[in-house]
Image (cartoon, rainbow, N blue to C red):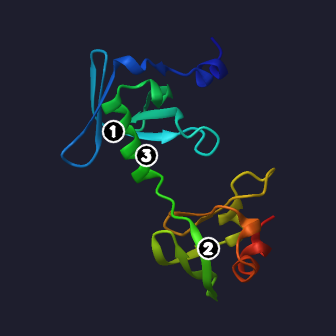
Amino acid sequence: MSELQTLAEMTMLDASKCVFTPTEGGYLSLKYEDKEYERVKICRALPYKAPDEYICIIDKDGNEIGILRDIKHLSEANEANIRAELTKLYYCPSITKILSVKDRMGYQYYEVITNAGKREFALRDASRNIRYVNPEKRGAVQIRDIDGNRYLIDDFDSFDIQSRKKIEAFLV
């Protein structure tokens, strides 16, 4: 087998053999067949196009355990545990209005209203951190702050004109 084939090989997990359990420390553990993983990380391979499909499961050392094809194939309790973890990991409030943007020493400081209340955050290199979620459709816009937090503008075209003017120069 070539090195490229080895790199491209994926281990698909059988959802019926997975048992995900929250730990006391706030993490998620996995029992799969005869193996137990005391702490696993999860991430979406396709967070916007298929948020419930191709969920990557990684052990505490960063090694891939495998990929779940679709979390809907899990038991109700396991699906609930995965969804709770994904909700924490992919928390992304929607911006409804941009109140102000200030440039200071290479950073932009934003004051916004979101569906979770008023927020303030900073950006570095706005042209890299303000992007269309799907550049072909040019609808939703994602903003990633310096701490890695994500914010979403659901429909940029229907966003209020004053808020839109504050960031449209960064959308390429």
The percent coordinates of residue 167 (x first, y second) are 72, 75
Q: Which amino acid type is shown beneath numbered disc 3? A: Leu
81 above or below 103? above
Which structural element holds mark 1?
helix
Which structural element holds mark 3?
helix
- Label 1 – label 2 distance at C-alpha: 34 Å
Is any atom of residue 60 visible in this view? no
The percent coordinates of residue 128 (x first, y second) are 69, 64
Q: Residue at x 33, y 39 (%)?
A: 81
Q: Residue at x 38, y 33 (%)?
A: 79
The percent coordinates of residue 87 (x first, y second) are 42, 50
Reading the image, the residue beneath label 1 is 81
Q: Which amino acid type is shown beneath numbered disc 1? A: Asn
Is any atom of residue 95 visible in this view? yes
Viewed as shown, does residue 136 lie left or right of 70?
right
Tell which tag, 1 or 2, sits nearer the viewer. Answer: 1
Check the image and name the residue furthest to the top.
1
Q: Neighbour class for label 2 at 10 Å: few (<14), some, many (≥20)?
A: some
166 above or below 127? below
Query: Upstream in the sequence, badge 3 or badge 2?
Result: 3
Kindly indicate whether the residue at mark 2 contacts the one at mark 1 (C-beta within 8 angstroms).
Answer: no
